[in-house]
Image (tube, rainbow, N blue to C red):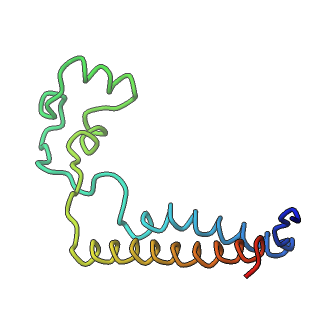
Amino acid sequence: MAHYQPPKQGKASQLIDVVVLVVLTVGALFVPLWLNMAGAAKSVTNPATAATWEALGQTPAQAAKYEALGYTPETAHDLILARFDYSFSVGALVTMIAVILLYYFLILRFSEVEYREVISEKFGE
């Protein structure tokens, strides 16, 4: 029985594959940030009128650590009082579920096609 030799891919195809993968990776990382769909806290709840460490609810030890990092009560105000926005839309959730299911079935289909090609190349019809 002959040793299996996989089909060769050209240099241009490899370059296109790499470019597509890099674009998809950068897109997956940065598009949510550009669309304001990801990131840190979105809002500050209960803004303090007088920005002092005590008004921000910080102990002297915490205040010392913030000051060691170069923060003042005024600059640390948004950092300390910011809260994460846990809201989501049902439409976005349904869309994400649909995308994941589509990806799953697409991968299953491509895997089946490639599996059958390898079996037919190795063992014939």
Query: For the point 13% across and 38% down, which residue is it?
Result: 50
Decide which of 107, 89 is in the foreground and name it. 107
- Please tell me in which quadrant of the rendered image residue 32 appears: bottom left
Query: For the point 85% across and 66% down, which residue is it?
Result: 5
Does 59 sit above or below residue 121? Answer: above
Which residue, as the protein is rendered here, is positioned at the far top? 61
Query: For the point 29% across and 37% down, which residue is it?
Result: 76
**In the rendered view of the protein, which quadrant contains the N terminus?**
bottom right
**In the rendered view of the protein, which quadrant contains the C terminus?**
bottom right
Side (left or right) of 16 relative to 51:
right
Does 51 sit above or below residue 110? Answer: above
Image location of residue 104, percent across then percent down: 45, 71
Image location of residue 65, percent across then percent down: 32, 22
Query: For the point 14% across and 48% down, which residue is it?
Result: 47
Does 6 sit above or below residue 98? Answer: above
Side (left or right) of 31 relative to 70:
right
